[in-house]
Amino acid sequence: MCYGERKKNQPRKVWLKKIKMKTSEEFEKEFLADCKEKTGKTLEEWMAYLEPKGLTKPKETLDYLKSEEGINHMNANFISGIFLNGGKPVFDSALLFNAHFEKFPDKKEMYDKLEGIVKDNFSGVQVVPTKGYISFRNDKEFAVAKINKGNIRIGMDLGSRDFDDYVQKAKSLGTMPRIAYMIEVTAIEQINDDILPFLQEANSHVNG
């Protein structure tokens, strides 16, 4: 069975809720835990097996695993991603998180204050770093933080409302189109309670 595949007789609502709440890192960890059972080889065996094949691109590696080795798409995607990542897990949350501040360490204090506001006001919120941004999820993603050289852009899913000087049209976030609004902050003093009503509105819109 593929990871994320609906089990026989599993209610659709239960399946959807389970899928929505899992992160890419959790799916990857599940795959690593039973890689041999699912694919016939351990991860280490796959890395050694693929090394002499001369595979250097994601699509060609994925296609090879699927067509030549008979691996299903989800599992082939995990193997391919890890192989092209030097044998290391792709979705390591600590590495993904720290990467956002390698070039912009001066933004860490600003981000920490933002995360504090989110955690203090949204019970059970998940903070999920991705390659492009840091996601805030309360079951489903309602806001993101995009770390840039001169600012932090706080992207939100606010449904449909007018843009203004404070809540702007989102740009260069790298998110799904529904994250269409953003507040841009350039100093730690701008991360304050003025932001909270918009985060609450976004969470209410997305998660009910």
Image: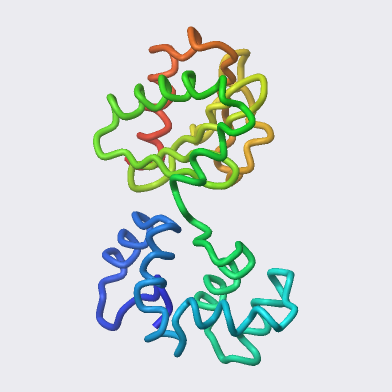
Tell me which colouring the rendered structure shows: rainbow
In this rendered view, identify the residue nearer to me: 51 or 149.
51
| Residue in front for this viewpoint, 145 or 69 | 69
Spot occupied by residue 177 in the image (x, y as percentages of width and height): 61, 44
Which residue is rendered at x = 49% and y = 61% of the image?
89
Occupied quadrant, residue 10: bottom left
The N terminus lies in which quarter of the figure?
Answer: bottom left
**Is residue 12 placed above or below 54 in the rendered structure?**
above
**Tally of numbered discs:** 0
Q: Give residue 6's position: percent from left, percent from top.
A: 35, 75
Is 152 placed left or right of 58 in the picture? left
- Asked whether 130 or 121 is in front, the reply is 130
The correct choice, above or below, for 100 with respect to 151 in the image is below
Of all residues, the one furthest to the top in this rendering is 189
Q: Position of residue 132 (x, y in %)?
A: 60, 43
Residue in the image at 65% along x and 92% along y: 68
Q: Nearer the viewer, residue 24 or 95?
A: 95
Q: Quadrant of residue 83?
A: bottom right
The answer to whether 192 appears left or right of 133 in the picture is left
Q: Dividing the picture into quarters, in which one does residue 13 lie?
A: bottom left
Q: Residue at x 40, y 70 (%)?
A: 4
Q: Can you give x and y, in whole percent of width and height, for residue 62 in the image?
A: 64, 77
The residue at 47%/19% (across/down) is 109
Identify the image quadrant of the C terminus.
top left
